[in-house]
Amino acid sequence: MRRETQNVLLVLLGGAVLKIALNGQYLRYVKPGLQPWLIAAGVATVLLAVVGIARDIQAASARANGVPAAGGDDHGHAHSSRSPWLLLLPVLAIFLVAPPALGADKVSRSGDRTAVGAAPSDSSFKQLPDEDAPLLSIGDAVTRAVWDSSGTLDGRQIRLVGFVVRKPGGGIDLARLVISCCAADAAPVKVRLEGDGLDGFESDTWLQVRGEVLARTATEENGYVPTFRVTSLTEMPAPADPYES
Amino acid sequence: MDAAPGAPATGAVRDQAGTGRRAAPRAPRRRTSGQRRITSLEVFCFVIALALIFSGPLSRLLDRPGLRTGSTVFVAVCVQALPFLVLGVVLSGLIAAFVPPSLMRRLLPRSPSAAVPVAGLAGVALPGCECASVPVSRRLMQQGVPPAAALTFLLAAPAVNPVVLTATAVAFPAEPRMVLARFLGSFGTAVAMGWLWARFGRLEWIAERARRVAESRGGESRWRVFSETARHDLVEAAGFLVLGALTSAVLNVLVPAAVLDTLSGQIVVAVLVMAVLAVVLALCSEADAFVAASLSTMPLLARLVFLVVGPAIDVKLYALQAGTFGRRFAMRFAPATFVVAIGCAVLAGVLVLGGVR
């Protein structure tokens, strides 16, 4: 591949990374903490290419003036490697397709189990905040449902936010994906919803539900997915950061 | 390759190499085609134009649940790895520009077998994941570091650095010994592979472009060397990173998670499954501890194998190694690493974790 083409590809690649880092789309793929790194990497990529282009132009004008160029002329037709063509794939994917955040499809591919966080080392959970229906992450609710023997969830109304996953055999789950680095390591956390008025929702619809986790419903047989009895629910837009950490 | 119209391209390159000027390292030319007039820039514009024209149908084509998930994972792996790759090529450029080969030779013990453990410990200092270590280790090789030591660095850096070990400690709060076991397993793998290479490795397996030792760079500005080296390494390595991300995305969608649950009962099967899983998932070494922790039905030893094998060899690394050091190298080095890593992980697990659990 020509050096000019390589430089153009690098500008596009750096630009693509900068674009998603600045407009918030990066949250579909990685964790919020990576943003400064993405900006730095995008800027560095663009800079390297721009410096390369500037040198080429300099060398070309020096050659045109009959001055033997100081080493900028020997790169123009030097590469037989075809691997840089592959850089087109992420560039086109980001600019043209912009793949959405993972959702119900990933959850159904991950089997029937829910991911369960580790129990705190002294196995005592903090009491829930003393308010009406505090908002918990699904991961937190599942971990408490599985490990907590002191009953911090018992009889408490809580709120959860997640998307709907319709199961092939009937039944409806509310799920989130937990990522620890990027979307490739996403693991689902979920609760099984029970209650009225759930039938109308398609998979991937985001809901905020209010209700309670039924005690001792997270068992080994059902993949530790606790049952959540819904008392009320509202449909909502997907949050900016669709993942739990 | 793009030949200058009418000019015998290989001859031109030989002339330039003969001047002794140190330019960014180049891939050897595989063939010449003096007649070809279409340049890559034109092909590139054509592809972009096509993609823009057909962007609607293209998006609809990808609008199926499985493909959508796959494309998200693909972009995620690329986006996640790019900052580390950039860090790696910047380091590589800095080494090329500011660290003279003579300094490297003075710092490392003279005999390769003594240099190997030193290189392994040096890996502690590079807080990146595996994408950063590939360009850096090639640069070390070009700066006159013995290949055995450079390869040890390649395997050690992503696995034993403080960031990765801290992540492991956070992911396994109930099993603090996991950190020590991981350190020993990965360090052992790196040193064992370095010694194996020193004993059995042949220089000609490594592509010529990767072992061309840097010549003196008289007259060239150091910043110029830096930016040219970094730019070149980025273009080369990023392409292979994309290939690895693609493989990982396909496997991520196709390998059913249910397979795991049924296999967790038998320790030998579990170890092998986790080793293979580490290879096909191609996770970043800073994240794999959390994934291993979440696979809570697996025996601890099998999860340790996952943590030791993953940073040493996976599909993304294989693509990067093949691109950087040549396919002949990667075909031999990668399977050997896989076997040695499993062995070292099991050994470390039995010693530190106290047997199979």
Image (cartoon, coloured by chain):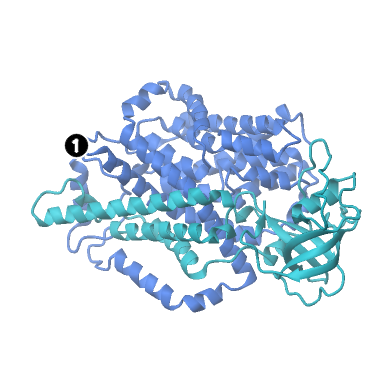
Q: Against A34, is A209 above or below? A: below
Vertical arrangement, residue A207 with respect to residue B82, above or below: below
Q: In this view, does B102 lie to the left or right of B6?
A: right
| Quarter of the image where one finds residue A233 | bottom right
Q: Position of residue A209 (x, y in %)?
A: 79, 65
Residue nearest the viewer, comparing B308 with B129: B129
Element at badge 1? Answer: loop
Q: Nearer the viewer, residue B326 or A207?
A: A207
Lateral position of residue A68 relative to residue A30, left or right: left
Looking at the figure, which quarter contains the N terminus of chain B? bottom left
Relative image position of residue A99 (x, y in whole percent): 56, 66
Number of numbered discs present? 1
In the image, what residue occupies the spot 39% across and 70% down? B48
For this orientation, the residue located farthest to the front is A131
* Observer-nearest of A101 and A229: A229
- At label 1, counting other C-alpha atoms closer than 10 Å, the crowd grade (few under 14, some 14-19, many 20 or more) is few
The residue beneath circle 1 is: B219
Q: From where the camera sits, is residue B332 visible? A: yes
Specify whether residue B25 is in view.
Answer: no
Q: Quadrant of the C terminus of chain B?
A: top right
**The chain coloured blue in the image:** B
Question: The residue under label 1 is which amino acid type?
Answer: Gly
Instruction: Report x, y in % for residue B180.
Output: 66, 29
Residue at point 38%, 74% (across, down): B49
The answer to whether A83 is drawn above or below residue B186 in the figure is: below
Relative horizontal placement of residue B38, taking residue A118 as reference (left or right) = left
Q: List x then y, in percent, for residue B161.
A: 55, 34
Q: Which subunit holds the residue at mark 1?
A: B
Front position in the image: A108 or A211: A211
Task: Please tell me the colour of chain A.
Answer: cyan
Q: Which residue is drawn at 73% across and 62% down?
A: A161
